[in-house]
Amino acid sequence: MDAGALQLAAAAVAIVVVAALVCRWFLVACAVGVRKQRPRLPPGSTGLPLIGETLRLISAYKTPNPEPFIDERVARHGGVFTTHIFGERTVFSADPAFNRLLLAAEGRAVSCSYPSSITTLLGAHSLLLKRGTAHKRLHSLTLTRLGRPASQPLLAHIERLVLATMRQWEPTATVRLLDEAKKITFNLTVKQLVSIEPGPWTESLRREYVKLIDGFFSIPFPFASFLPFTTYGQALKSRKKVAGALREVIRKRMEERGEENGVKEEMDGKREKKDMVEELLEAEGGSFSEEEMVDFCLSLLVAGYETTSVLMTVAVKFLTETPAALAQLKEEHENMTKMKGENQPLEWVDYKSMTFTQSVINETLRVANIIGGVFRRANTDIHFKGYTIPKGCKIFASFRAVHLNNEHYENARTFDPWRWQVPFTVLLVNSNNKLQNEVGANLFTPFGGGPRLCPGYELARVVISVFLHHLVLRFSWEAAEEDRLVFFPTTRTLKGYPINLRRRSESV
């Protein structure tokens, strides 16, 4: 081969090499561009078309042990993963740091977001669905009314309701504990909202509420109001009845207020408001509309009725299954009664002295997870651990996944109220209990957090404490039949936890 041919061949090789390098550079540049254009979502699976992983989630949460649904995905993808549930792509968080970020970012980076069945049944003006300044003013009003359980009149009313319910139990009787607990919490909430004592009106309202709540996680069929045989159709019908009953009470109160003279109004301004309706009528110069007040009261009834009564029932179930804990709880309340004397009403100082009772409540909240988590929607792109969750994406912050993680709690899925006996601020060295340290407060979020922290969380604790106090002093019991927890559509006992009661001979 002559020199000219060699030079030509060399030039051809050089051109091929340069072309290959240019192509490689172009492909890399394109890939980088695509990565910049497409956010890197947390890994995961969207399951079947349209349905996604919804059926898998529901079937898991209808069992006593739904954890494998979360555990398998966390093991495969990490603490933050992508799934597809309830009709749309959802980022699921089992990461406590990301959960705290979401709770704190409410109203800025994220906003609350719930299934359409819930939003329709609660109403546009409910506390759960309000945002921004509108949510702040309603949350503040709720705190004013329900966030002060130290009030002696309120504590006395709670005790009266508990004792009135227990007096209806025969010396030996079988009761469905969840039903009995719901009577207490519903009547208490009605009293706080509209000042109506237990009777036919409250019982009629409660029956409609049961149907309304059943519709929260049902399928919102189009024209469901014309399909009363469906769960959602029945819930819409009950919602109309409940709203009508509340509207009637509010209108009557508005008329009564209009008849008051200026002197009476001036005197009213100096006394404590008797209920939430009065708070609403006088707040901000009476600017709340009738519809706003109806939706607001309706949503507070849901919150007060369902969660606290389930927590009361599950606490008794866990205590029944843990005899040592029940024995220590009885000892605490018997000792307190000996110091106070029998037949003395409970006071705030008594409640604050129930330290083991509070440990039982904390552990029940942690294990049962009455509020399993919260839905949020991204208002902007959110960056976390190298992933980008795009604006508009739905996010579920799972409290349950954190509370039942063995990395955060020793034997996390075991009911162990003694783990709470050491204050959070004390760091235990060489202890088996991982919870009792400064990090614990950041892991434990049974009432949510941030601007949407449940305003009635302390009231719920007081109600449960008073109930347990009188239950252990007055009765002994055992489970009437086997019952178990299920977690969909909400956490509850499958059969309402039937128990055989026997009045203690030494009880008052």
Image: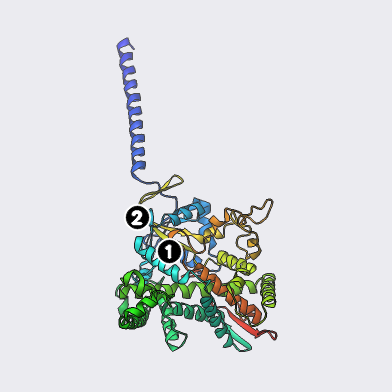
Q: Observer-nearest residue: 502 or 167?
A: 167
Q: Which residue is mark 1?
A: 54
Q: Where residue 117 appears, x then y in whole percent?
A: 37, 70
On-image quarter of the C terminus = bottom right
Does the image show residue 148? Answer: yes
Q: Amino acid at mark 1?
A: Thr
Tell me the quarter of the picture where residue 403 sits.
bottom right
Q: Is residue 432 left or right of residue 10?
A: right
Front disc: 1 or 2: 2
- Label 1: state its secondary structure: helix
Q: Observer-nearest residue: 307 or 146?
A: 146
Tell me the quarter of the picture where residue 205 sits.
bottom left
26 shown above or below 199: above
Q: Where residue 156 appears, x then y in whole percent?
A: 54, 79
Q: Which residue is mark 2?
A: 392
Q: Amino acid at mark 2?
A: Gly
| Label number found at residue 32 | none
Does the image show residue 476? Answer: no
Q: CA distance from mark 1 to mark 2?
A: 20 Å
Which label's residue is closer to the chain start, 1 or 2? 1
